[in-house]
Amino acid sequence: MSPVIQQAPGGVMPTETDMNPILQAITWLLLSLSSLVVIFWFLTKFYIKSRSLFMLGDGLMLGSYLFGLGESIALIVPGSAAFGKDIATLSKEQLDDADKIGYTRDILFLLSLGLSKLSACEGVRALSPDRIHHLLTSIIALSVVIWMITSVFGTAFQCGASGPWDRDHARCINQASRSHLRESENRRLILVQDAFLRFVYISSVVIDAGLVTLPIAIISPLQMTLRLRLTVMSFFSFRVIVIAGAIVQLVYLDRLWVENYTLLAFPYYLSTQLVLFASLLAAYIIYFWPFLRSMQSGLMSANAATLTSRYPLTRTSKRPTLKAVMSSHITKRGYIEIIPTLSLARLAPSKTSSHTPPAQDDIAHTSPR
């Protein structure tokens, strides 16, 4: 007997055999929140701030959002109604449509996730001009690129180059093809696919852990109050939520290999949407804290390089001097430079300094030719 779907005045209500309405509702909600975050970011960049240059980090964030937008749309189109439903209630045509949509959705998810990590790398790079910090950031960025290439190509060609979404042949490592294979071959394909997905998610967790640890290592030695230190660290530690979501994906990954995977893998599908949203938000939020800090100080600068703050973003072992700042060959664009009050006092001319005779060394350097 086929299960009956409850019909509510405003639409379809979820049941024990149809959790798709919950999946689509949460996807709509997260998509709306992501769009609001992106709109707020570009409003602060192009309207509140006078500088409107389109930097690399901006392009990566926009690309991550667009791929995430495509992934969310793929999950709310009518053909994706199979996700979250009992497989016994689905026809072969519905499963075929779900296979094509799932294939597209997986690739868009990985692309969005990878670009958000690269955008976060740009945000970490802006923390400090130190060469060691830049080297570590470049290593993480290179790891992200390798992870993207491996995961995207592995997902795109898991069923071959001809009809890669078609699961009805023995070359494909998937759910449907296992019914046509011997038990030993069936188990081998499951293990290969499971191992590949676990590699994708575990390596993603390791990269995210690096994107959390490195900013904390940069910020920790800076001279600031504990409250400010924790505030800044919290912006860069938001990516911990992405790590938690990826762990949930790993926990429910085995449900992709059961017979009724369309229904029982509902927690996996839902955690995928949460990971996508958290990754986008984690990439955007690290660019918001200078804006929020300037609002608290009652200051709105022309660009990020002139935002004032009570704490520096450069790791220095001693207080900077005017000579060190002027002679530095490192580009300071994009960093927040703080000159301590003591240095400003030294630079300020005193009432008697205008009548003080120049030092002997200065006379020697300024003598006429």
Image (spheres, rainbow, N blue to C red):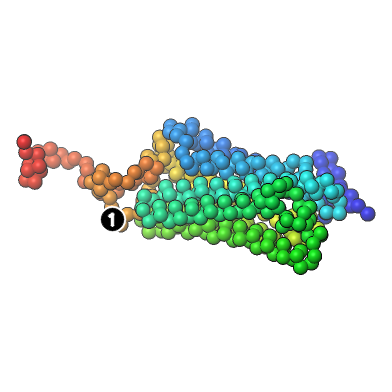
Image x and y of residue 286, in percent: 49, 47
Between 145 and 71, the one lying in front of the other is: 145
Q: Residue at x 41, y 40 (%)?
A: 304
Q: Is residue 174 above or below residue 356?
A: below
Quadrant placement of the N terminus: bottom right
Q: Residues within 10 Å of mark 1 (few under 14, many from 20)?
A: few
Q: Residue at x 7, y 42 (%)?
A: 363
Q: Amino acid at mark 1?
A: Lys
Question: For the residue labelled by badge 1, is the local secondary structure a helix, a strand or a loop?
Answer: loop
Q: Is residue 175 above or below residue 59?
A: below
Q: How many numbered marks, from 0 up?
A: 1
Which residue matches tag 1?
318
Q: Residue at x 12, y 38 (%)?
A: 354
Image x and y of residue 177, in percent: 78, 57
Quadrant placement of the C terminus: top left
Q: Is residue 253 left or right of residue 292?
A: right
Between 194 and 12, the one lying in front of the other is: 194
Q: Residue at x 25, y 48 (%)?
A: 324
* Residue 234 in view here: no
* Residue 132 in view here: yes
Image x and y of residue 263, in percent: 79, 55
